[in-house]
Image (tube, coloured by chain):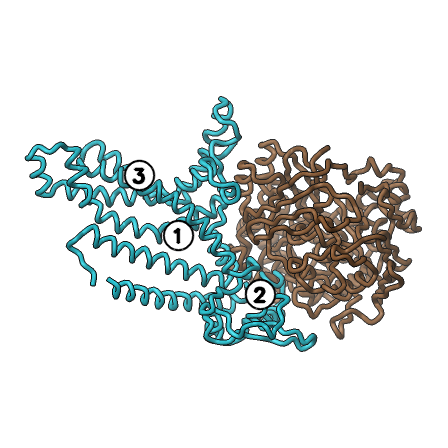
Chain colours: A brown, B cyan
Amino acid sequence: MRDFTHTDGSTGLTTHPVAEMYAREHKAGQLDRREFLVRSTALGLSAAAAYSLIGVDAALADGHRSVPAAGGTLRIQQEVRALKDPRTYDWSQMANITRGFLEYLIQYNEDGSFEGVLLDSWEANEDATVYTLNLRQGVMWNNGDAFTAEDVAANFVGWCDSTVEGNSMATRMGGLVDPETGVAREGAIEVVDDHTVRVTYPEPDITLVPGIADYPSAVQHRDLIGTNPADHGVGTGAYQIADYEVGVSAQLVRNPDHTYWGDTYLDEIVFVDLGQDPAAWFAGAEAGEFDMTYETVGEFVDLFAAIGWEQSEVTTAATVVIRPNQNTAPYDDVRVRQAIHMAVDNQVCLDLGINGQGVTAENHHVCPIHPEYAELPPQTFDPAGAQALLEESGHADFEFELISIDDDYRKNTTDAVAAQLRDAGFNVTRTIIPGSTFWNDWTSYPFSSTNWNHRELGVQILNLAYRTGVPWNESGFSNAEFDELLTQANGIQDADARREVMVRLQQIMQEEGVTIQPYWRSLFRHYSPGIVNAGMHPKFEINVHYLGFSA
Amino acid sequence: MGAFILRRTGVMILTALCLTFVVFFLTNLFPNLEKLAKTQGNARMTDEEVVSWLDRNGYGGPLIVRYGEWLGLVPGWTREDEATGEITGRCIDFGMDPADAPTRCGLLQGDLGFSTVSDDEVGNIIGGRLLLTLKLMGWAFGVMVPAALLVGVLAGMREGSRLDRSLSTFSIASTATPEYVSGVIFIVLLASSTAGLSPLLAEWGWIEGRTLFLGSARSAMEDGITFWNFALPVTTIALYGMGYIARMTRASMAEVMTAQYIRTARLKGVSFRNIVLKHALRNALIAPFTVIMLQFPWLLTGVVIVETLFNYNGFGWTMVQAASNNDIELLLACSIVAVFVVLVTQLISDIGYVFLNPRIRIA
């Protein structure tokens, strides 16, 4: 059983001065439990220790996993995409399949806490520049080699290699990458002993833990960095790929020649690809072709509930942004961007875009569930003022082309924005591009919508999407004050202190009219009754080791 | 006859060559290559990364040379990585020693290439998928042709009768309803547990499962074909083609029924049943025969819709996947198959015509 009571023998920090401060804040009601868990486990506390600091029995807390019966075959509806070097994964679905044999150092739980998988524990020093990672003992690769600190160090070097095309881990590694050479900085990653690795940042950085809990950070064997796991199947997990047909199905079965370090229940997991149309998923469910969805969207949430499936819901920082690109006229004019803001009511986007399945947001891409979120005064919705401002800027006759992907909620939300802009007197045309070609130019469309996944900390998204010149900066936003404050915020480990800086960062996002970011999505998953530990995860993670049928 | 078949084969090869070149040209336009790089590399790659990826994976050379590589006339590309010294190439598989790899690997060597979307050899994929489609088409034909001929003959033997009018209305309606409409109607009516007939039947206890038929044919691929999982896709395809063939048969039948020799037979006192079966039928079937053979290529487009609608991973579905992911070599293989199917059915139709109508001769 792998729960927070440490029957697996993990140790981890039992306390930390800052964590104790968080515990006091939580008890005083200034911090909710989720935020408390994110912050204290990111410091290196085990979840059990964190729970005990606030006087909660971990076994009774949220996110506790129950023990399923051993055996069985579970079929999961999920796209089956061609696998590639895990560093370059761009879909959580790929990682969900390889998670059966390629595990992670740390995992992010549904309740917002971090838990060691291949790591037994980790500690940060006071100013968050040095992290010590303690590896789990007794983990073996399924090719017979022992899992050691060399493996972890080799993976870190691989993750830091920004010369590999599409290696999104390099962005997550931040200061560990030497900007001159594009690879890992000298001495940043040290092997202390067989089971200890030390990671040193040149400046404070608090995104290491969420970064190595993200789906592209699957840990590969030291000699196989950069290879496609489908070609060799070497990993530490309990399963192996028995069959893999892209677009059709993938089958994982328990690896008979490998002793797994933890517990696992299912004998076989089949991922069934039914394409991207939710109607086809529903038809498949009615025909009894799978037991659990990857994600249920839109009106199908009610339909799946209607046929008696269990529903699991999680509120996340996943969202859609409808952003002008400031490198294109007339969006380089801040008045135009502000006029767009004033013309759009986020509540309408929430209602029309995703049937109200979420909460409204405030156009600054920092979510209330992020620990450093700062509350700002509400924005004004003023279509008449928007029209006046647009006329003042001299672009009243401009024909705004609003682009979106051809897909359910993103299309609907963008339509809702377009309709509101038209109501405010803007001249708007809508362009819809099929999913297969939409992503070719997603960063350079003049005015388009993009979906963004959940991230654990507010600064992570700002770093990825709004810092000057970063690859995913789709709004063409470039602001010296913003960049400087963001660098500053990245080094503040205490979320309350960081919030002081965040206030200004969030204000800049609103003042500059960087993007319309109308709502935070709730995510849903459905499964047939009797399946356990299949709850929805804010980052769509499925860990096949935990799944099973109720005992 | 031999020369005729030989000439037809020549035409087929020439057509295939032209078509594949067109497909090759279109799929190798830069925006398409960019799409390929982004699906294969990372959906959010920068422009420089795209160019470097294309170059590293052999999409960098001139178009005509790469077409030659695919045909197997030009040696496959090889590339040495400057940093690691590792040699990669078109003909070098994962883990293969570059020295052992053949210089040419293309169509002439029997190598259909590599499917990027499926991450597998095209040869491994296309065979199984074609077999699945063959089963679907076989069943669809088995239902469509007899039903269409029956409807057509019944309607045509007494032109203008009530039977003729009602059957004609039915065939026109079925031809006028494309697969994507009839398929959806069938699913809603017969394969949904919340709408149509199934909830009623389930309430009355007439059906055991949740729905009368399955709205997805996926189980037919692994667990075998049953009436429940195959009825809807087969009917959807068959219904569309059926109306057309029935109309053709009716017209031909009606014409034959007005011929002099039929009148003679009637005057001689032959029974109506014998006139239809022994005198009219054979002559009436000449025109529909060509139409039936022409339905094969039509069916190929029909299965694209039906297989996608019913989640049946056959040839049509593969074609959709290949096209939407710009999977160049899979698309090329699909076009060869399509050319082959069209021209072979035409050949059969021409030869069959000779046997049905002795007045026609092919040299």
Residue at 75% across, 50% down: A376
**Residue B200 visible in the picture:** no
Residue assigned mark 1: B301
Same subunit, tags 1 and 2:
yes
Q: Residues within 10 Å of mark 2 (few under 14, many from 20)?
A: many
Residue at 59% across, 63% down: B38
Q: Amino acid at mark 1?
A: Thr
Q: Quadrant of the N terminus of chain A?
A: top right
Q: Quadrant of the C terminus of chain A?
A: top right
The answer to which quarter of the image holds residue B10 is bottom left
Specify which label sits upstream in the sequence, 1 or 2: 2
Q: Residues within 10 Å of mark 1 (few under 14, many from 20)?
A: few
Relative to A510, is B278 on the left or the right?
left
Q: Amino acid at mark 3?
A: Ala
**What element does badge 1 sit on?**
helix
Residue assigned mark 2: B37
Same subunit, tags 2 and 3:
yes
Specify which label sits upstream in the sequence, 2 or 3: 2
Q: Nearer the viewer, residue A434 or A333?
A: A434
Pointer 2 and pointer 3: residues touching (CB < 8 Å)?
Answer: no
**Residue A244 visible in the picture:** yes
Question: Real-space Cα distance between discs 1 and 2?
Answer: 28 Å
Q: Amino acid at mark 2?
A: Ala
**What element does badge 2 sit on?**
helix
Q: Residues within 10 Å of mark 3 (few under 14, many from 20)?
A: some
Say above or below: B140 vs A199: above
Measured from the top left, where is residue B315 in percent x and y?
Answer: 45, 53
Which chain does the residue under circle 2 lie in?
B
Question: Real-space Cα distance between discs 2 and 3?
Answer: 48 Å
